[in-house]
Structure formats: structure tokens, C-alpha cells
Image: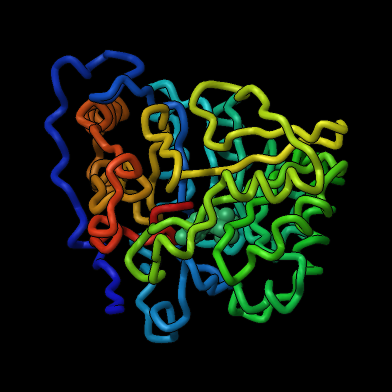
Amino acid sequence: MARTVIEVKELRGALPIPAAAARGAGAPVDARGRALRDLRISVTDRCNFRCTYCMPKDVFDAGYQFLPHAEVLTFEEIVRAARVFRTLGTEKIRLTGGEPLLRRGIEKLVAMLREALPGIDLTLTTNGSALQAMAPRLKAAGLDRVTVSLDSLDDATFRAMNDADFPVARVLEGIDAAAAAGLAPVKVNMVVKRGMNDHQVVDVARHFRGSGHIVRFIEFMDVGSTNGWRMDDVIPSAEVVRRIGEHFPLEPAQANYTGEVAERWRYLDGAGEIGVISSVTQAFCSTCTRARLSTDGQLFTCLFAQRGYDIKGLLRAGADDGRIADSVAAIWQARDDRYSEIRTAETARGRKVEMSFIGG
Ligand code: SAM
């Protein structure tokens, strides 16, 4: 399969002229009636892992051009953007990437966000490689919780999937450290890919049962244009639930809130719960309230988007907060995305922005 990485410059969309209706409108809703509740902020496009389904080594190699420093949003710019989103109804911020713990001083950004946005739900998604050392500092800075990616407990499978020869034991230590620091409940994300790690589904469920941590099994998605996605490689969540349920009986649990990404399942014996994220087989676009701010300050309204809107340009051109809020509101009001509902083999082959850049 031909592997092309979309140049960031090609992706920029024109900023919609703020609609009069957006001005002062408070919390905007999009063309499908969805609010702007969650903001994911990619704080770096770099990662120390080369997960084969996300940043394959043959593309993200020594010659790959990551963003130059000057293009990356500063902490001050991130906080300002977050404050603007807050005025538009955003209740939850997730720091991601790339690998967010690679961003120098990330705990300072957490502290700045916590101070600027008291009461906001502030979380972070990490590969866990640096979590053991950083968990206490992140908690002290005001982080609420972490989600840790962990695709296998089997060391050989884990090393093969991260393609950086990183041992699984270090990530497990990171999860323990996060829980000990109070960044709980820890969520553990496992991307399930047929023939690669699906033999680990029951083992991972068994390992975390009764721990208080919540494993979420994620269907392998056609994000970006470089991961060689094929429908045949997707294990439907229904199969994950069936496989686990054969060993540990499960029952469906109520969503915690409308628009929750993971569908919850509870162990009948009271040993906790799991989640399944079924973007491929059970699209949840109709309740998607997530926006993404890329490392270089572009706003994306869908994980599978082909283009973003340049918010950094506004931040650096001296626009005041009201003008930026109007622009974001206008972009959101024009939003009509529902990629997962209309996914076909054809769209899956289409050009999409990489997840490491847009923020997972
Ligand atoms: N570096 C951090 C990490 O590893 O969690 C944050 C960024 S990563 C892009 C965020 C999440 O996206 C991870 O849980 C990762 O497993 C998931 N992910 C990446 N590519 C995926 C794909 N093709 N399908 C499903 N999930 C994917």
C-alpha cells in the first residue's frame, strides 16, 4: 500500500467568517445539534514509541519532519485557547499527542490550566513510559486522571507493537504509580488488532479485574493515512465482550453521561467494569462533542478530518478572546462531520490527518 503523509500546510481550511448568530451566543451547537463539551489538545507531535497502527516506523523515521519549535503552541497560547473554549461550553480537557509526557515542563502546563480553569475536568492520555517518575508531579499540578495505553501484557507482543522495544513492565509500574498518586480511576486503553494482540484480550481483562482500573478495548481504526488499515484486522467490540464474558460474565452498564465514548460493561461478580470503544462497528458520531487542537494550533472537528482551521494564526495576530471565540463558534456551528457513520473501504483509503499530530 502506498503510504503518504499529508503535509500540514495542505490541510488548512479557511476560517469561516464568524456568523452574527455566533457572536455572544455562549455555547454553540453544530449542524447536528452537538455541543462542544470536550477539547483534546495535542501538546507534541513526537512520540518515543512507533506503534505500528499509529506511527509506523517506515514513515515516522529519522528523516520525518516533525513540527519546528516555532510552530508549536506555547503553554500560554494553549491556556488562552482553552479559556476561550471554556466560554463556549467546554467542560473537559484531555492533553495528548504524540506522547504528552515528552513535552518539557508538561506539569507546568497542567498547573497553568488548573489555575486558569478551576473546576474543569483535566485528564491526559499517555503511553505510560515516563509515568512512574511523573505521576506524583502531575497530580500535584492539578491533573485529575490519566489514561494509559497498553496493548498487551505479553512482553514480546508489547515490544513488537510499540516497535521501540519498550518493556511492558515499565508501563505497568507507571499505572501503579498513577493509582498511588491518586490519578484514579486509571483507564487503560488497549487497541485490539486481529492477529497481533487479540489473543491478549482475556489476559488483559483478567489482569485488571478487581484493581479499580478500567480497561477500554478499542477497535483498530482507520485514522491517518499510514497505518495500512483493513477492515479484516478489526475485531468488533461485540466479539471482545463475548470472549471476555465467556470467562467472566458481564452485563451492560448505563453510560455515565450522554456522549460517553466507551460503552460500559460490568462484571457480574462485582470485580469492576470494562469499556469498549467501537468507532468502526457502532459509530457514535451522533453524540460526539469533541474538538481537537493540534500541536500547531489547528482546530479539527473530527478525528478523521482532512483539514483543520488555523487558530494559532488568530492567537498570534493579536485577535482578542472574543474574536477567537466567535471564530471557534462559527467553525463549530458549521460542523457536520459524521465520518464513522459513512465509513467505507473507499473513505478509509482517503487522505486524513495523522492521529499523532491531531491528538488521540
Ligand atoms: N502517546 C499517547 C498514548 O500512547 O496514549 C497519546 C496519543 S495516542 C495517539 C492516543 C490513543 O490513540 C492511544 O490509546 C492509542 O492506542 C490510540 N490509537 C492510535 N492509533 C489508533 C488506531 N489506529 N486505532 C485505534 N486507536 C488508536
Q: Position of residue 95 (x, y in %)?
A: 54, 47
Please state which of residues 76 and 36 is positioned toward the viewer in this rendering: 36
Q: Residue furthest bottom?
A: 62
Please state which of residues 110 and 42 is positioned toward the viewer in this rendering: 42
For residue 251, side relative to residue 210 (left or right):
left
Does residue 100 appear in this view?
no
Does residue 101 appear in this view?
yes
For residue 13, side relative to residue 71 (left or right):
left
Q: Position of residue 355 (x, y in %)?
A: 42, 58
How many numbered badges does the structure rendering display? 0
Q: Position of residue 239 (x, y in %)?
A: 60, 49
Of the 4 image quadrants, the one containing the N terminus is: bottom left
Q: Residue at x 14, y 17 (%)?
A: 20
Q: Position of residue 42 (x, y in %)?
A: 46, 52
Q: Residue at x 58, y 59 (%)?
A: 192
- Looking at the picture, the colour scheme in use is rainbow
Q: Residue at x 62, y 59 (%)?
A: 101
Q: Residue furthest front?
A: 246
For residue 283, side relative to residue 22 (left or right):
right
The answer to whether 273 is drawn above or below residue 174 in the figure is above
The answer to whether 325 is drawn above or below residue 279 in the figure is above
**Image quarter for residue 16?**
top left
For residue 74, side relative to residue 112 (left or right):
left
The answer to whether 305 is drawn above or below residue 71 in the figure is above
Please state which of residues 94 and 193 is positioned toward the viewer in this rendering: 193
The answer to whether 190 is drawn above or below residue 31 in the figure is below
